[in-house]
Image: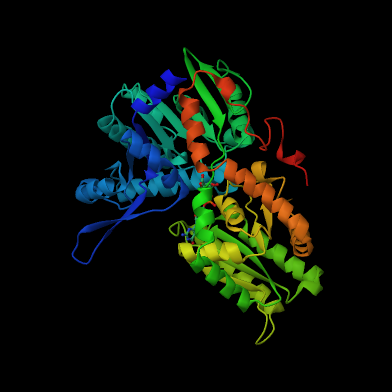
Amino acid sequence: MRAEKTRAERERLIVVSNRLPFTFKKDGAGAWRAEPGGGGLVTALLPVLRDRGGMWIGWPGTAGDASELKEALASAGTGAGYRLEGVSLTADEMDKFYLGFSNQIIWPLFHDLQSLCNFDPAYWRTYCEVNGKFADAVKAHTAPGDFIWIHDYHLMNVAAELRRRGVTSRLGFFLHIPFPSPDLFMKLPWRLTLLQALLEFDLIGFQTVLDRRNFVQCTRMLAKDVQIEGRGQVLEARVGKRTVRIGAFPISIDYGAFQRRAASPEVTAKAQELHRLLPERKLILGIDRLDYTKGIPLRLKAFENLLERYPELREHVSFLQVVVPSREDIPEYHRLRSEIEQLVGHINGRFARPGGWVPIWYEYRNLSRLELLAYYRAAHIALITPLKDGMNLVAKEYCTCSIEEDCVLILSEFAGAASQLYRGALLVNPYDIEGVADAIRRAYGMHAEERHARMRRMRNSIREHDVFWWVDSFLRAAITRDLSAFPQPEGHLEEDASEYQLPF
Ligand code: GDG
């Protein structure tokens, strides 16, 4: 163990993601300025990157030549405590690699929405080229012995491109979105190449055992000579002479930081202000990026169904739906926004009372951190009903910020978070409009004792398996020799559980 630790400590950690954890904007004088992006991933990786003298490689967020940003990258890196290296992408590459292959093929397909895919072969070609560009950057800035951790569906080909360039360093990959069942993965015209590319990594991490099982099944169907064995959190695949580890590592949040900030006087005051606006009413909250996977129209229909079937709840609940702008360059997202806004107008038009109650408060904007936490703290019920979601951190953040433990989480059984929070949340099928309406009614009438017990269970689980646990377990899975140290984490669904066996 000691020898393994020493080896791990010596290795630099190189993180590679589509976007760098900073955004770069020009100031009034025309100089580039870096603004740090928040987020649990950055927070969790920061101590490791600082200790090991690490580096983050990614696209800086502006089309054009990253060398223009050299100074801004260097000074942002000095401030952050790790190096930043930019990968330049042209507008055409962004169009075909990011908006095209990543977000019009992989994103819908891996979220079970095959009918929204646009299988344009030009997208695939550019995806391969851009993954090659990332591999060039990784090769140029790393040394043998570094541990290279690549993130997410934009960069699934990078290991294959690195091996082609002779890089022998150990490579890890984490998929933040779900991995689809074979029925869906088989639709992908480039399925075999992509699967073989993933098997070039040394460790492949998924959010849940269900995603890992889907990957294992696809591998068994497409790559018959690969033997996969093991139990617990991490399995092993024999790929020729190599061993590839395949694990389930549910991502999480910085529990301590969220809880502390939620308890701050500013957040408390803002949450109380919201309660004053809603006397005698329960606040139901939905917060999502604008995305068709988040199930917003069906959720609004479920709320309408609630008001229709349970008129006694009218004027006693208000639904605050925040939609955060996202991927506005894709036509599908425009259509979705119009659909949501029409539904909100329709439902408010049907039930609102002049000068009085408005059933849905709708906000289409980015919230500040303070607003976000105040909304979490103020809401009596969170309604998180994605059609499919890798994990869904909003669910974990909501529970963590509910420091009085006196509220209810309604959660889609198709969110990765359900495999961890199923004992505390009210699980729903987001396609079942009446079922979701009934869950809201149940949450509304739930006794305080049950609310506390459920919330405490979820908060304990999130505290125990926070984002630092996630980073640590992924990195240990990459280096440890003894996989018996990786039983399935307690309280998470097991390999043989399917979403249809969840307790309701
Ligand atoms: C992908 C996978 C997986 C949201 N609105 C505002 C805001 N947020 C923050 C939340 C949360 C994050 O954005 C959203 O995280 P999610 O997990 O819900 O969703 P995706 O962005 O789709 O992320 C997902 C995740 O990767 C991690 O692996 O869980 O399944 O799809 O942290 O707090 N933050 C601020 N203002 C907002 O208006 N400041």
Whether residue 175 is visible: no
In the rendered image, the residue lying farthest to the bottom is: 355
Measuring from the top left, give residue 267's x and y in whole percent: 52, 66
Q: Exactly how many numbered labels are in the figure?
A: 0
Decide: is 466 above or below 163. Answer: below
User: In the image shown, does 106 or 475 lie closer to the viewer?
Assistant: 475
Q: Residue at coordinates 59% horizontally, 63% vertically from top-left?
A: 377
Q: Is residue 9 left or right of residue 110?
A: left
User: In the image shown, does 152 or 2 lie closer to the viewer?
Assistant: 2
Q: Quadrant of residue 303?
A: bottom right
Colouring mode (rainbow / by chain / secondary structure / one colour): rainbow
Q: Is residue 427 left or right of residue 27?
A: right
Q: Residue at coordinates 55% horizontally, 46% vertically from top-left?
A: 108
Decide: is 318 above or below 353. Answer: above
Measuring from the top left, give residue 376's x and y in whole percent: 58, 62
Decide: is 106 above or below 161. Answer: below
User: In the image shown, does 269 or 186 lie closer to the viewer?
Assistant: 269
User: In the image shown, does 504 or 463 lie closer to the viewer?
Assistant: 463
Measuring from the top left, give residue 264's x and y in whole percent: 50, 63
Whether residue 85 is visible: yes
Q: Quadrant of residue 398?
A: bottom right
Q: Quadrant of residue 138?
A: top left
Measuring from the top left, give residue 425's x and y in whole percent: 70, 51
In the rendered image, the residue lying farthest to the top is: 241
Q: Is residue 244 left or right of residue 132?
A: right
